[in-house]
Image (spheres, coloured by chain):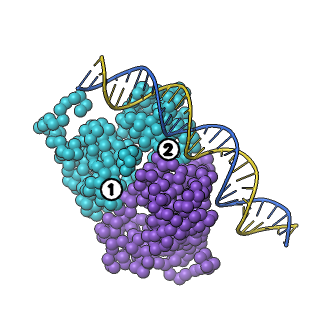
Chain colours: A purple, B cyan, C yellow, D blue
Amino acid sequence: MINGAPYLENNLLHDSSQQNLLDVTHIKSSCATCSLRELCLPVGLNDQEIQILGDVVSHKRKVRRGGYLHQSGLKFQSLFAIRSGFLKTCVLEEDGRQQVTGFHMTGELLGLDAISSEIHICDAIALEDSEVCEIPFTKLEEISIVIPSLMRHFHKIMSREIVRDHSVMLLLGSMKAEERLASFLLNLSRRFSMRGYSESDFNLRMTREEIGSYLGLKLETVSRAFSKLQDENIITVDNKHIQINDINRLKMKMGNSSCIT
Amino acid sequence: MINGAPYLENNLLHDSSQQNLLDVTHIKSSCATCSLRELCLPVGLNDQEIQILGDVVSHKRKVRRGGYLHQSGLKFQSLFAIRSGFLKTCVLEEDGRQQVTGFHMTGELLGLDAISSEIHICDAIALEDSEVCEIPFTKLEEISIVIPSLMRHFHKIMSREIVRDHSVMLLLGSMKAEERLASFLLNLSRRFSMRGYSESDFNLRMTREEIGSYLGLKLETVSRAFSKLQDENIITVDNKHIQINDINRLKMKMGNSSCIT
DNA sequence: CGAGGCCTTGATGCACCTCAACCGACGTGG
DNA sequence: CCACGTCGGTTGAGGTGCATCAAGGCCTCG
């Protein structure tokens, strides 16, 4: 999908990848050679341990823009580590509204919320063509018995997700629209910069409505908040292209509250 | 505290001890005889495994009403399982405001958010005299290597916390005051009923202000929402004593949204 | 008794929602 | 080619739900 390559390619490894309903393809991959190993699950593992993990994480899946990585209600079997691309997770309410619970980029792990019930309780949708590594969860638990440092790191990842959620709760519970948007932009900025991209110049992958859903605001309010920050010369907005002109004043906008982690 | 008894009493049963800086006491305990083992970490373990776990969970701590179980910034070493009582967790912002991130009752596990940084990032404060079991986290990780079902259950507990946080995010992001309060009351009701207490008649342990902080509302708004639900004969409010008169209509109040899990 | 904590209720203001109009980009089909 | 619809975004006008400010009641405690 990234250069228009056919999805239905057939490779001969133990991986026979047909496109399924969820709009993905399967490809062999390995942790040992992955450029994300300092960001992803393998953090802190030695070569041998990475090899064991890589054998478990044998499948790579592609999800095209707009496609589902997983859907609410489906049985949970694997976590997904994002190799490239950008996804959102969202829960669908009975009345059709959907609430975005997170935006996810390379090196992040998806599916942690499904461990408890073994059923996916949210949808994961690609906001741009994406590739993920599939990590069968029971196998991950098995090898984490022989690789204690992997287990420890996995626990930290889950814990970090809880911390992140708490900071979003704080945002939703006590910040004004402009503060929320500032916090959101700074969070994106930091995550882009951690991945080697510019911290002050990036493209949003999501619509105003998705941002609003995540921040507990209506899309018009998000748009107005963007305009206001631009009027103050703190950022420059050109549709989805954002430049942060004065990151310190953007931080001031958040008031005394701490940023989304 | 409850009846004005001195705190520094020294009794000779397995029930006493000295008050330390964090206002707690240390006592020997065991999972094998704990009435909460179907609710707490030991879920699904056999007798031998419970024994191993019980040996690790050797200390019981008491926290008086208003006392800290742990404080933000302190080094994380143990998880805490609540044996009795009721606690809140909250983060303190730079400007002095505090936001409640959760209310916690018997059988629930505290400290999961501190695993990632190994530093407590929130305060845990007892809302009534409470007892907790202290679970040294590195030991828990060690024994979960030899008790895979413990590891699996622990992962589910962490995952459940993430699910819970997502449902609170949904509440904060999209529900009106009355819906939030209804959701909150139904959540308490369900958790009380799981523990053998009445689902329709209970006492709140927290103030209106703490409820408001948790729900992203001001205390006056919480108070008005209580009054409104009472005016409609859905609940009866007598200060902290709540009776749910019509649980179905209370559920309707939440709209189509799902409850806090 | 007075002080302080917790709660309730009323009056007022404002931040955000809602509704609506409009714009530009893009794709489609006559 | 242009007409047209759709989608995402911006902006304005008006309404409203909640915050804010303020007063007063109840209870406990010293």
Locate residue A77 relative to residue A152 in the image: left or right: right
At x 32%, y 77%, the residue is A46
Residue B143 appears in the picture as rendered:
no
| Whether marks 1 and 2 lie on the same chain | yes
Query: Tag 1, which chain?
Result: B
**Quarter where residue A118 is shown:** bottom left
Q: Picture coordinates of residue B13 (x, y %)?
A: 14, 38
**Quarter where residue B73 is shown:** bottom left
Q: Picture coordinates of residue A152 (x, y %)?
A: 32, 65
> In the image as oriented, which residue stretches furthest toward the bottom?
A12
Locate residue A238 relative to residue B222 in the image: left or right: right
| Category of crowding for the residue at label 2, using alpha-carbon neighbours closer than 10 angstroms: few (below 14), some (14–19), many (at least 20) | many
The three-letter code of the residue at mark 2 reads: Cys
Q: Is residue B137 above or below residue C11?
A: below
Residue at numbered disc 2? B259
Residue A13 appears in the picture as rendered:
yes
At x 44%, y 31%, the residue is B200
Position of the N terminus of chain B by quadrant: top left
In-front residue for pair B34/A191: A191
Disc 1 to disc 2, C-alpha distance:
26 Å
The three-letter code of the residue at mark 1 reads: Ala
At x 20%, y 53%, the residue is B55
**Secondary structure beneath label 1:** helix
Q: Which mark is residue B114?
A: 1
| Category of crowding for the residue at label 1, using alpha-carbon neighbours closer than 10 angstroms: few (below 14), some (14–19), many (at least 20) | many
Q: Which mark is residue B149?
A: none
**Secondary structure beneath label 2:** loop
At x 46%, y 54%, the residue is A254
Along the polypeptide, which appears first: circle 1 or circle 2?
1
Q: Picture coordinates of residue A70 (x, y %)?
A: 54, 62
Locate residue B15 relative to residue A259 in the image: left or right: left
**Quarter where residue C30 is shown:** bottom right
